[in-house]
Image: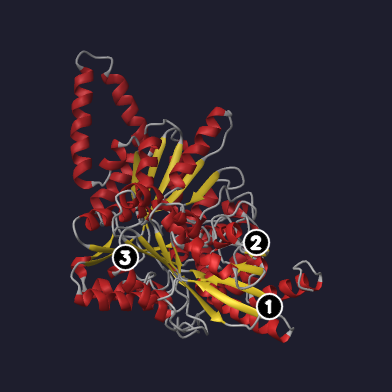
């Protein structure tokens, strides 16, 4: 087993408090080495965790995470926190089924105060915990660590506005890795920051105010000094926004200067009011490939830690294919615009952004804004295409209804990562989109199973439909089924003479359905396979036609049961009906095959289920 020096001696956060700053710096180097080695095997979020090592060590040293509430916004940068709070020996299970989550999870440790996974919510949750502390007369610190990327989300500003005026003792740590907020503000700024937060300065300021209040005209002098100081601060410090919201602003501080960060955290703890500490960090720090290409090493699969090369050669996936096809359409049609919410590469829109920069819009972590802006574009004659992960489209639900659907505007939503995503777990699986989109009048849902169908459905959505259209497709590559059946609302993709059962599905799961049918045929059960391509107002009629094919119907879906095809089939089918789906639950993390098996929706599980049902005679066929 590889040894990691001083890290091997750390059993918990309490061990940090007896170490010198020199020893803590050595520990930070060991942590980076351990993270690179671990993530190179399991995959995970690399650059963000390497960037916060000193900050995370400082937080664990200055606070007691078993009592104090430290919330990492998104949570994908909480690896150091997990390592230092007793979970290091499980890092070989990171993001694996039954292993450690890549995000904060209270069921793993009482040092994880809440579930994380989506961005921009940390200050809201932290303020709620601070209010609870006050109401219950308890004593603990509350800290929200939020990145500058998450600050592009409007929810963060709603929370900051509320927190700043709340009077609650609360620390917001702004982890600024130079992605979106502040530029380097120079030596004068750093000097004034150190001066402003020193105990000597704070005590002197209080004494001056007290003495001025005792002399005639002193209040006016005090106000004049404050105004002059504010003008200087506005000129050299990026404080005005946060201070106008009611926060005391500290920083900026070099987030890799461990001693300075610890000193400012210690000072912030003493301030019984809302405080914002601005920390400057470098994403991917300490690992050359990640420093050079932090976006590429944000979320990674397994790689060679010596060279940084990824072990698996990238194959064409749905996102990349979508981006390529959209470019083809945009080349011929100047009305087409592409919108994404901080995911240009993840949604395959990088080439579009390069080729059509005036028609590409990355709005940041602001899905609500993306949907509403698309509505405005559509209202004025453009063809907006909004590419958002399924799990993040949830955040734009009101805009889908209010701004798009009520007016029947023609917006195409390309719903990436639909169905089971896998390793990122409950907060990222796209198992709710069919249900919440079907609930909106006028929304049509297209379900391609392969690249050819995605191309055809994208063309149909752009040019042969009116009103809002959603195209849902999974993460990763297409399967063995590659026939284009997009022209049919529902297609029989496997015939069976006098079928004993119909297996009905949609999207990428058709591959599992076809494989299950082959296994069942070997066991003497004739199974016809149908897949639905369009979920719209004509769905019930289509399902009624399919229902007539056999007395026994099994509906296979990679979404929750509520709102799925199975519920609609139950309205029209008069024979035996079995519904196989992800169930009434949030799914754990793990590989996609692992989660399929856990839900019983992989080919072998489906075949075993139907075989057992037939043996038991429950289907009336035995």
Estimate the x, y position of residue 48 in percent, counting from the top left: 44, 64
Label 3 crowd bin: few (<14), some (14–19), many (20+), radius 10 Å: some
Q: Disc 3 or disc 2, which is closer to the eye? A: 2
Residue picked out by circle 1 = 604
Label 1 crowd bin: few (<14), some (14–19), many (20+), radius 10 Å: some
Estimate the x, y position of residue 538 in percent, counting from the top left: 45, 62
Q: Find the residue positioned furthest to the top.
A: 216
Which quarter shows the C terminus? bottom right
In this picture, is 104 found above or below 527? above
Which quarter shows the N terminus? bottom right
Q: How many marks do you count on the picture?
A: 3
Estimate the x, y position of residue 274 in percent, counting from the top left: 41, 36
Q: Secondary structure at mark 1?
A: helix
Q: Secondary structure at mark 3?
A: loop
Q: Residue at x 48, y 80 (%)?
A: 478
Q: Are marks 3 and 2 in contact (CB under 8 Å)?
A: no
Mark 3 or mark 1: whose residue is earlier in sequence: 3
Residue picked out by circle 2 = 574
In this picture, is 477 found above or below 246? below
Label 2 crowd bin: few (<14), some (14–19), many (20+), radius 10 Å: some
């Amino acid at each position: 087993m590889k040894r990691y020096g001083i890290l091997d001696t750390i059993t918990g956060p309490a061990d940090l408090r007896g170490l010198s700053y020199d020893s803590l710096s050595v520990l930070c180097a060991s942590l980076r080495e351990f993270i690179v080695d671990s993530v190179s095997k399991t995959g995970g979020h690399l650059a963000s965790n390497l960037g916060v090592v000193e900050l995370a060590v400082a937080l664990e040293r200055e606070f007691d995470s078993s009592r104090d509430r430290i919330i990492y916004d998104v949570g994908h940068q909480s690896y150091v926190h997990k390592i230092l709070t007793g979970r290091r020996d499980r890092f070989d299970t990171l993001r694996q089924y039954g292993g450690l989550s890549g995000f904060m999870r209270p069921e793993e440790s009482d040092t994880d105060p809440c579930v994380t996974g989506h961005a921009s919510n940390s200050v809201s949750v932290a303020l709620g915990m601070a209010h609870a502390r006050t109401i219950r007369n308890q004593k603990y610190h509350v800290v929200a660590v939020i990145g500058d990327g998450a600050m592009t989300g409007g929810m963060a500003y709603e929370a900051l506005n509320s927190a700043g005026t709340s009077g609650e003792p609360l620390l917001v740590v702004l982890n600024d890795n130079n992605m979106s907020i502040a530029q380097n503000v120079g030596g004068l700024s750093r000097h004034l920051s150190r001066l402003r937060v020193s105990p000597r300065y704070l005590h002197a300021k209080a004494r001056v105010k007290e003495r001025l209040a005792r002399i005639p005209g002193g209040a006016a002098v005090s106000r004049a000094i404050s105004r002059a100081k504010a003008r200087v601060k506005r000129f050299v410090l990026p404080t005005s926004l946060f201070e106008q919201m009611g926060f005391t602003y500290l920083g900026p501080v070099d987030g890799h200067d461990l001693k300075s960060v610890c000193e400012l955290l210690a000072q912030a703890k003493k301030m019984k009011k809302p405080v914002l500490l601005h920390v400057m960090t470098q994403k991917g720090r300490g690992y050359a490939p990640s420093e050079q290409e932090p976006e590429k090493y944000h979320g990674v699969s397994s790689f060679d830690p010596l060279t940084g090369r990824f072990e698996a050669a990238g194959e064409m996936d749905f996102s990349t294919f979508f981006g390529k096809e959209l470019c083809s359409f945009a080349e011929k049609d100047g009305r087409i615009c592409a919108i994404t919410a901080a995911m240009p590469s993840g949604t395959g829109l990088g080439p579009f952004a390069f080729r059509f920069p005036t028609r590409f819009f990355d709005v940041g972590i602001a899905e609500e804004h993306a949907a509403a802006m698309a509505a405005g574009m559509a209202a004025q004659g453009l063809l907006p295409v909004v590419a958002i992960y399924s799990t993040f489209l949830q955040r734009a639900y009101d805009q889908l209804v209010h701004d798009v659907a009520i007016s029947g505007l023609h917006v195409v939503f390309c719903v990436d990562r639909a169905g089971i995503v896998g390793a990122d777990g409950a907060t990222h699986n796209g198992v709710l989109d069919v249900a919440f989109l079907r609930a909106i009048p006028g929304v049509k849902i297209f379900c391609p199973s392969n690249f050819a169908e995605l191309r055809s459905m994208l063309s149909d959505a752009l040019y042969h439909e009116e009103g809002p259209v959603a195209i849902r497709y999974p993460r990763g590559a297409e399967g063995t089924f590659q026939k284009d059946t997009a022209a049919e609302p529902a297609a029989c993709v496997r015939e069976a003479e006098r079928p004993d059962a119909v297996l009905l599905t949609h999207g990428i799961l058709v591959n599992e359905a076809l494989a299950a049918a082959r296994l069942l045929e070997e066991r003497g059960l004739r199974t016809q396979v149908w897949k639905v391509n369009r979920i719209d107002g004509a769905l019930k009629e289509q399902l009624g036609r399919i229902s007539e094919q056999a007395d026994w119907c099994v509906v296979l879906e990679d979404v929750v049961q509520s709102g799925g095809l199975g519920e609609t089939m139950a309205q029209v089918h008069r024979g035996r009906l079995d519904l196989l789906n992800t169930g009434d639950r949030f799914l754990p993390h793990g590989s996609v095959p692992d989660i399929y098996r856990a839900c019983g929706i992989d080919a072998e599980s489906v075949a075993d289920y139907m075989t057992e049902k037939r043996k038991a005679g429950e289907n009336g066929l035995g």
